[in-house]
Image: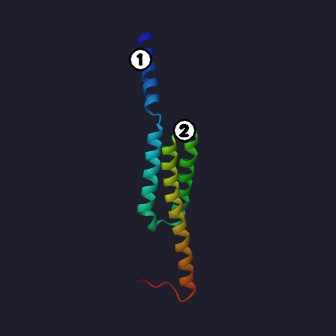
């Protein structure tokens, strides 16, 4: 009976430690997320942008648990966040341009 308990305990410990995300995994996840948004954002609806913004906020908050980020890692995260901010800004500019087009005679395809 004790052997079963110890085996079960070891399995639980292995499972718990294998599920922990390293800071390198976190940075890669953040980079992949922003890259995916970059590739697909042209077709996003307003609802999809809201979902993306929520996921972005969760990723930013996740960084707080990594107190030992190096200066290089912090710089990499700053670059990723800046790229995302650029995508958001472009979305806003595109929205303004569409509004101006609507104001002056409707949208015209190039």
Q: Is residue 58 left or right of residue 108?
A: right
Q: Which residue is mark 1?
A: 7
Q: Which residue is mark 2?
A: 66
Image location of residue 24, percent across then percent down? 44, 40
x 51%, y 68%: residue: 90
Name the image quarter holding residue 65.
Answer: top right
Query: Observer-nearest residue: 3 or 96?
Result: 96
Q: Is residue 28 above or below residue 34?
A: above
In primary-sequence order, the first of circles 1 and 2 is 1
Q: Is residue 36 above or below residue 45?
A: above
Q: Is residue 7 visible?
A: yes
Quadrant of the image for the C terminus? bottom left
Q: Is residue 1 visible?
A: no
Image location of residue 42, percent across then percent down? 45, 68
Name the image quarter holding residue 7.
Answer: top left
* Residue found farthest to the top: 2
| SS of the residue under disc 2 | loop
Mark in the foreground, 1 or 2:
2
Q: Is residue 32 left or right of residue 94?
A: left
x 52%, y 43%: residue: 71
Question: Is the residue marked by circle 2 packed among few (<14), some (14-19), or many (20+) residues within 10 Å?
Answer: few
């Amino acid at each position: 009976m004790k052997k079963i308990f110890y085996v079960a305990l070891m399995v639980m410990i292995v499972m718990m430690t294998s599920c922990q995300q390293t800071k390198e995994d976190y940075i890669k996840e953040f980079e992949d997320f922003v890259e995916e948004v970059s590739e697909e954002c042209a077709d996003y609806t307003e609802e999809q942008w809201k979902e993306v913004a929520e996921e972005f906020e969760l990723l930013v908050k996740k960084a707080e648990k990594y107190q030992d980020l190096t200066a290089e890692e912090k710089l990499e995260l700053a670059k990723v966040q800046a790229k995302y901010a650029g995508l958001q800004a472009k979305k806003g500019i595109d929205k303004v341009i569409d509004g101006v087009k609507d104001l002056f005679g409707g949208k015209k395809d190039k």
